Amino acid sequence: MDREFLRKISDNQGIIHKVTGIYCDNPEDRKDLFQEILIQLWKSYESFRNESKFSTWMYRVALNTAITAFKKASRHPLSNQVESVNFQLAAEEYDYEFEENLKLLHKAIEQLTGVEKSIILLYLEDKKYEEIAEITGITQNYVRVKMNRIKKKLKAILNVDA
């Protein structure tokens, strides 16, 4: 079971990186959250029943762990410092406008609630509403409603004309 778990985690570790990246700005906080997610995955691995894809289950555990950590950090705002995000690309591919747009989007996403962050992260990962519903544990209809609200919220934050 240990080897299988490690292989699956290794194959899908990008999920954890994406979740920690959306919930944490500080590299140390990302490392801490990464470790906490791994611990929670290990603790709950025996309960994984293969009723969904491993990646779906992994997203659910990672997002629930991140939301819990986000709520704890929100209660202690002084310990939740924001740092700028650095996007580094090879010189010939470096696109300053793209980088600025990513920074603006990231700053806007920071202002969303924990659940909203989860939904937008999965949406940006091209997950279908059905899979987002399965991962987050909310109905598909509610995902659609929340997604519309999130889009409006992000447009308002970014001052984008509809």
Image (cartoon, rainbow, N blue to C red):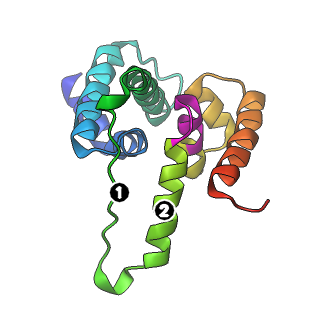
Visible residue check, residue 17: yes
- Does label 2 or label 1 sit earlier along the sequence? 1
Q: Secondary structure at mark 1?
A: loop
Q: Position of residue 123 (x, y in %)?
A: 60, 46
Name the residue type under label 2: Leu
Give above or below for 105 relative to 136.
below
Gap between marks 2 and 1 measured at Cα: 9 Å
Q: Quadrant of the C terminus?
A: bottom right
Callout 1 environment at 10 Å: few (<14), some (14 to 19), or many (20+)? some
Residue lying at 34% horizontally and 34% vertically, measured from the top left: 80
Q: Position of residue 115 (x, y in %)?
A: 56, 29
Q: Quadrant of the N terminus?
A: top left
Q: Secondary structure at mark 2?
A: helix
Residue lying at 28% horizontally and 44% vertically, measured from the top left: 26
Q: What residue range appears in magenta?
A: 111-120
Magenta segment main secondary structure: helix
Query: Left or right of 57: which side holds 145?
Result: right
Q: Which residue is mark 1?
A: 85
Name the residue type under label 1: Val
Q: Which residue is mark 2?
A: 102
Q: Position of residue 9 (x, y in %)?
A: 30, 36
Visible residue check, residue 125: no
